[in-house]
Amino acid sequence: MDLTTIEIMGYAASIMVALSLTMKDIVKLRIINFIGCIIFCIYGSLIGAWPVVATNVFISIVNVYYLYKMRKSSSTESV
């Protein structure tokens, strides 16, 4: 079975998202999941799967929002 670069990218994205769900630390989970989502966005764009792109753009925005919110709340707690 010969894998193309695009197929490898799809598998890598799947692995990143699955790996993120094994994290106990929510920050690590969101960062790894964000990376997986970005790879999925690229993958979806390359194969023309726009629902994959749209879903992962949305999940990426959610991840960034909560990472920002967590960072902001941790910086105000230390003040």
Image (cartoon, rainbow, N blue to C red):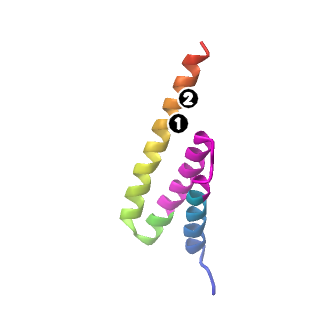
Please state the total of marks drawn on the protein image: 2
Q: Residues within 10 Å of mark 1 (few under 14, many from 20)?
A: some
Q: Quadrant of residue 16?
A: bottom right
Q: Main secondary structure of the magenta part?
A: helix
Split into 4 quadrants, where in the image is the N terminus?
bottom right
The one nearer the camera, 45 or 20, is 20
Query: Magenta region: which residues?
Result: 19-42
Please report the residue visible at 61 percent of the width from the left and 80 percent of the height from the top. 3
Please report the residue visible at 47 percent of the width from the left and 48 percent of the height from the top. 60
Mark number displayed over residue 71: 2
- Amino acid type indicated by mark 1: Leu
Q: Secondary structure at mark 1?
A: helix
Q: Secondary structure at mark 2?
A: helix
The one nearer the camera, 10 or 78, is 78
Q: Position of residue 25 (x, y in %)?
A: 62, 41
Q: Position of residue 67 (x, y in %)?
A: 52, 36
| Residue named by callout 1 | 67
Say whether residue 64 is magenta. no
Q: Is residue 70 above or below residue 7?
A: above
- Amino acid type indicated by mark 2: Arg
Left or right side of 14 for 53: left
The one nearer the camera, 78 or 38, is 78
- For the residues bearing labels 1 and 2, Cβ distance under 8 angstroms: yes
Which residue is the extreme one toward the bottom? 1
Which residue is the extreme one toward the top? 79
Please report the residue visible at 59 percent of the width from the left and 53 percent of the height from the top. 20
Q: Is residue 24 above or below residue 44?
A: above
Please report the residue visible at 50 percent of the width from the left and 65 percent of the height from the top. 43
